[in-house]
Amino acid sequence: MSANPRWDVSRALGVARLFHLVCGVRDACVTPFLTLYLRQLGLAAPWVGILMGTKHLVAAFWAPFCAFLAKSHQKRRALLAGSLLGSAVASLLMVLVPPLDKELVYRSCNGSGSVTTTVVPLGVTLTVSITAAPEPDSSLPARRSPGVLEASGFRNGPGESDQEISSDLHGYLVGSVEGVRPTSQGLLHPVTPGVKDNPWEGTFEVANTALPLLPGGTAVGSLANSSAAKGKAQVLELSLEGLRWTFILSLGSVVFWELLTAPLERVADDSLYEYLDFVDATDRYGSLWIWRLLGMSAGACGIAAVVGQLDCFLMTSTPRGVVHFYGYSLVSTLALLVSLAFPVPICRQREHSDKSVKARSLVGSNPRLIVLAFTVFLLGAVTSTVQNFLFWHMDDHGSSELVMGFSVALSLLGEVLLYPFKTTLLRKLSRVGTVGLGLGCLAGQLLYYSFLWSWWSVLPVQVLSAISYGALWWAVGASIEALATPGTERPLSAMFRGHFYGSGSSLGSFVAGFVAMRFSLAVLYQACCVALLLWLALFLSIQPRLPQERKINYSKLLAMEASDSSDSEQGTERDWLVKAMREEHSDW
C-alpha cells in the first residue's frame, strides 16, 4: 500500500460518518418495510419467505466475492458509485411489479363500496377484499377499512370484528357480487386446527358443496352447464397466472437489486479500515456504526410519516408502499454524491489472499468457534422471522406504518444508548454470559410477539433489542477477537456476519413462510422461542466441557516485529513470556 497524496484523518472520518448516516437512511426506507409491500402485492407468506430467503443467500456469498474483485482490480470507488447508482435504478423495478388485485388498491383509496373475491387453487393466495359503503343502520360504522384474507390466513381489516366480516362474507360468493343473494352458507371452511373460535385465524379452502358465482354474478346450477365450467376454469387460470407473474417479477427484481446493493457495505468498511490502518487510527473505526443506526432510526420514522401523509395521493393503481422505493432512490442519489469523497486507499502490493482460508480452517479446528458459529446461524434464522413477519403481525392488529417505523427506531436507539456500557457489560458478565443474556432476551421478545393485543403493544418490548441484538453481537465480536490468530480477525468476523448469519437468515426465511401459512404467526414465534431456549440451555451446559482458552495468545505475541524493540526490551519480553508461561502451567 502506498501513501495517498494527502492523509487527512479528520476529514476522512467526517465523510465516513456522513456516508454511514445517509446509507442508514437509505436502507431504512425499504428494508424494514419490504415484506409488508410484498404482502400488499398479494403474495402469501411462503412466497415472501422464498423471496427473502433468496435475498439473504445472495447477500451472504455475493458481497465477499465482489469485495475481493474490487480490491484486486483497484475498482473500489467505481464499485461504490456503481452499487449506489445501480441499486437506485433497480429498486424502481419493484414499482413495476403488478399487484394481484389492482381493483383492491383503487377501492382502498377511493372508499367505494363493493365486495370482490378471487378464488384460486388451494395453496395459492386467496384474496377477499371487503369494503363497505355507508349503511343506514346506525350500529355499523360509516366506512369500514379494507380487509384482506390470504391463504395464509393472517389479516383482518382494521376496525372490523370477526363477526362483522363473517356476516358480510356469508352474504357474498365468488365474483363481483354486490347485492346478490347467497347460495350457500359453507363456501369457506377453516382447515387449520384450533381456529373454531376465530375462523379468520388459519388456512381456508373452497368447499366442494357449492359452485361459485361467475364474474357476471350468475349462479351456477350444475356441472352440466359447460359454459359455467369454462368460466370457472378461466377464473382459476387467470388467478394462477397472475400469481405466477407477480412472484416471478418480484423474485427477479429482488435478486437483481440485491446483486447491486449487497457489496456496498462490505467494500466501504474494508476501504475505511485500511485507510485508518495505514495511519494507525483504527481505534477510531469502532464507533462509526452508530451513525448508521442513527440514520436508520431517522429514515424508518421519516419514510413512514411520508407514506402516511401521501397515502393515495401519488397513484391509486399500485400499493402505497411504492413511496418507500422512491425515497430509497432519492437517498441513494445523495449517497452517491457523498461516496465521491469517501476515503479509499490505493493498494499497490497485493496482500496475502489466504486469510479467508486460514479463517475457515480456524473455525473447523476450534470447538469454541464451532459452537459460536452455530449460535450465530441460529440467531440469523430466528431474527429473520422477526424481520420478515413482525410488521405483518402488527398490521393484523391495526398498527400504522408510523408505529412500525417507531418500533424500529426504539430498538436501534436502545442499542446506541447501551454502547457506553459495552466494556462494563462484557467484563461483569463475561462473553459467554452476555451471549446467554442476549439469547434469553430474544426468546422473551419472541414470546411477547406471539401475544400482541393492540396496535401499540409491540413498542415496550423493543427496548430489549439493545441486549438481544446489540450486546449479543458485541460478545460474539469479542469472542472472535480473542480466538482469532493474527491477521484473521476481520476475515473471521466477516465470515460470521456474512456466511453464518446470512445462511441462517436464508434458511429461516424459507421455513418461516410455510410454518406461518400452516399454523400462524403466533405459533411461529412461540416455536422460535422454544428453539432458542433449548439452544441456550445446551450452550451453557457445554461451555465447561470445551477446551479452555489460553490466557496468552502466543501467536500474537511472537508475531511482534523484532525491530520494534531493542535488545534489552527483547530480553525483558522473554522474561515476561517465561513467567507468564509458568503461571499458566501452574493453573493446569
Image: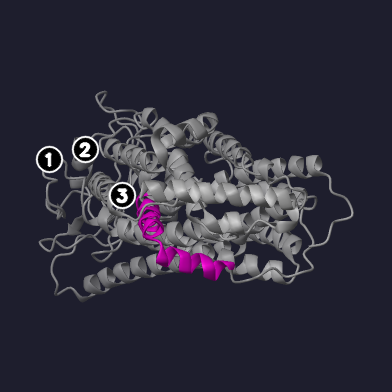
- Pointer 3: residues within 10 angstroms few (<14), some, or many (20+)? few
Q: Nearer the viewer, residue 573 or 121?
A: 573
Question: In the image, which disc is placed on residue 512?
Answer: none
Where is residue 310 shown, x and y percent of the image? 57, 37
Q: Identify the residue shown where x is 37% and y is 52%.
A: 548
Report the number of numbered marks: 3
Q: Nearer the viewer, residue 571 or 34?
A: 571
Which one is earlier in the sequence, the residue at label 2 or at label 1? 2
Disc 3 or disc 1, which is closer to the eye?
A: 3
x, y percent for residue 546: 32, 55
Q: Which residue is mark 2?
A: 162
Q: Are marks 2 and 1 in contact (CB under 8 Å)?
A: no
Q: Main secondary structure of the magenta part?
A: helix
Residue ID for mark 3:
543
Q: Nearer the viewer, mark 2 or mark 3?
A: 3
Front residue of 34 and 409: 409
Q: Nearer the viewer, residue 66 or 48?
A: 66
Q: Amino acid at mark 2?
A: Asp
The magenta region covers: 355-382
Residue located 61% across and 63% down the image: 260
Visible in this render: residue 256?
A: no
Q: What SS does tag 1 mark? A: loop
The residue that disc 1 covers is 197
User: Mark 3 or 1 closer to N-term?
Assistant: 1
Report x, y in % for residue 389. Answer: 37, 48
Looking at the rendering, in which quadrant would you find the N terminus?
Answer: bottom right
Residue name at image x 80 percent, y 50 percent: 341
Q: Determine the secondary structure under disc 3.
A: helix
